[in-house]
Amino acid sequence: MVAFATSGEDQPRLALTYREAGDSLGVCERVVWQLVKDGRLKAVRIGRSVRIPVSELNRFVSEPAESV
């Protein structure tokens, strides 16, 4: 399960930036960007910002790995 990022008030965040999502997964933000582009991760647009829901990261890491 992916750890929640916290705000300055120690409340769990519901969605993360590409960089924060990458840090949570242990990959660079470019990999997260590609996963969203390929449709393997869902992103939410909030105004001009794009965020990855933490629930989506949890779903992604819990699904079986694809064979290469």
Image (cartoon, rainbow, N blue to C red):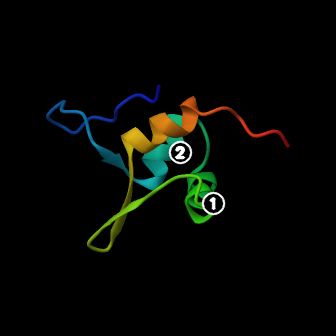
11 vs 54, nearest the viewer? 54
Indicate which label's residue lies in the foreground, 1 or 2: 1
Q: Residue furthest right?
A: 68
Q: Quadrant of the C terminus?
A: top right
| Left or right, 31 with reference to 55 | right
Residue 18, given in percent of the width and then of the height, sits at 47, 54
Residue 32, given in percent of the width and then of the height, sits at 57, 53
Q: Quadrant of residue 51?
A: bottom left
39 vs 35, nearest the viewer? 39
Amino acid at dot 1: Gln
| Left or right, 42 with reference to 30 | left
* Marks 1 and 2, the one that precedes in the sequence: 2
The residue at the point 59 percent across, 36 percent down is: 26
Q: Which mark is residue 34?
A: 1
Q: CA distance from mark 1 to mark 2?
A: 11 Å
| Left or right, 57 with reference to 13 | right
Amino acid at dot 2: Gly
Residue 49, given in percent of the width and then of the height, sits at 33, 67
Residue 58, given in percent of the width and then of the height, sits at 46, 34
Q: Quadrant of residue 27?
A: top right
Numbered disc 2: secondary structure: helix
26 vs 68, nearest the viewer? 68
Disc 2 residue crowd, few under 14, some 14–19, many 20+, Cα 10 Å: some
Disc 1 residue crowd, few under 14, some 14–19, many 20+, Cα 10 Å: few
- Mark 2, residue position: 22
